[in-house]
Structures are given as C-alpha cells and as structure tokens.
Image (tube, rainbow, N blue to C red):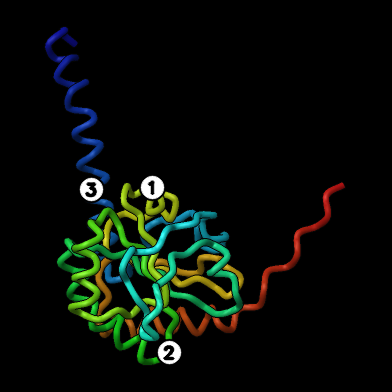
Amino acid sequence: MSGGGLRRALIAAPVIGFALLAVLLYGRLQSGDPSTLPSALIGRPAPDLALPPLAGLTTDAGVASPGFARADLAGGAVSVVNVFASWCGPCRQEHPLLMALKDDGVRLIGLNYKDKTDNALRFLRGLGNPYERVGVDPNGRAAIEWGVYGVPETFVVTGDGRIAFKYVGPLTPEAIEKTLKPEIEKARSAPPPAPAAPAN
C-alpha cells in the first residue's frame, strides 16, 4: 500500500470503528429493551459515593432535602435512583411519571447531573419534587461511577444497596408498567446475598 493509502486507512479506521459502535448502541436502544445496554454494575453494590444536597431544596415536610450516599441505599427499602437535569428535555417528559411513582409509594432518589443549582431548583419547584433526597453531581464524576450513558437514566437498587436493574432513556407509561414495576417487585422479593466467605 502506498504512503498516501496507508495514511487514509489509518485516518478512516477510528471513524469506521466509532460508526460501528454507534450503530450497535442505536440498535440496542431501538430494540425496545433498554436493559440490553451493557452494565457491569448489575448485582454489585452501588458506587461508594457521598453526594451533597441540592442547596435550597426542601422536602414535603419543609425541611432541607438531604443529599445521598451509598449508606442511604442500604437501609432495607428498595430505591429507584433517577439521573436527571433541568436542561434535559426527556427528563421533563418523564417527570409526571416519577411524581405518580412517588404517589404509589416508590422511594425515589435523584442524582442531579451537571446542572446549575438555580435551574435545578426551578425545575423541581415548577414540576414537583418526587425525590426523597437529591444528590448533586456538578462535574459528572458520580454518573461515571454509576455507568451512566446520558440523562435520563433510572436504576433499581435493592434494600442492601446492590444495583438490580438499569433503564436507559426516558420512562414511559408502558415501560413503567411492563418493566420498571416488575423489576422493583423482583428487587423487593430478592433474597439477600450470601455472606462472603472468611479470608484464610
């Protein structure tokens, strides 16, 4: 191969690789089963992070809404962690469904992704706050630890703090009834993991 042909091949290889990856991810998103996107965290403990609260946000009781850490996810109740941002159009689209889940008694925790405090407060004050607590992730590091592809994403976390399920993209009424609620029930009925064997 000539020098020019080799140079063109070297330039084209990453572009072709990226295009193939994009087609693969798009195909999985369009398959109707967002859980087919790979996640190495399923069955593993949630990342060991402590996220600060969204300053100025209050709970229904009028007290300051707390942030969250992994310990808050291991208190015995199944949690649904929702990654959202005020600038995210699909987050607005799914928000009324999160409010309905709250009304149904689902424990929701928010991870506010790369947002400005004032914008996030306006978002939750205007549309309602479905979250028991909201952790702020201004630089996206926590989202990386959670394996987030983009917003919105939703995780089901077992009562002992393990990630049981991940849903990529905005929730829909059908996705909640056919996918999310069954996964919540499955997490509620899951036996706790066996204790680790003692080290020799």
Label 3 sits on a secondary structure element that is helix
Residue 170 found in image quarter: bottom left
Residue under label 1, please give it.
141
Q: Is residue 117 left or right of residue 143?
A: left
- In the image, taking residue 191 as reference, residue 105 lies left or right, namely left
Amino acid type shown at disc 1: Arg
Q: Please identify the quadrant where the N terminus is shown.
A: top left
| Distance from Cα at disc 1 to Cα at disc 2 | 30 Å
The type of residue carrying mark 2 is Gly
Instruction: Specify the amino acid type for callout 3.
Output: Ala
Q: Residue at x 58, y 65 (%)?
A: 71
Looking at marks 1 and 2 on the same chain, the residue that comes earlier in the sequence is marked by 2
Picture quarter containing residue 10? Answer: top left
| Circle 3 or circle 1, nearest the eye | 1
CB-based contact (under 8 Å), mark 3 and mark 2 = no
The reply to whether callout 1 and callout 2 are in contact (CB within 8 Å) is: no
> What is the secondary structure assignment of the residue under circle 1?
helix
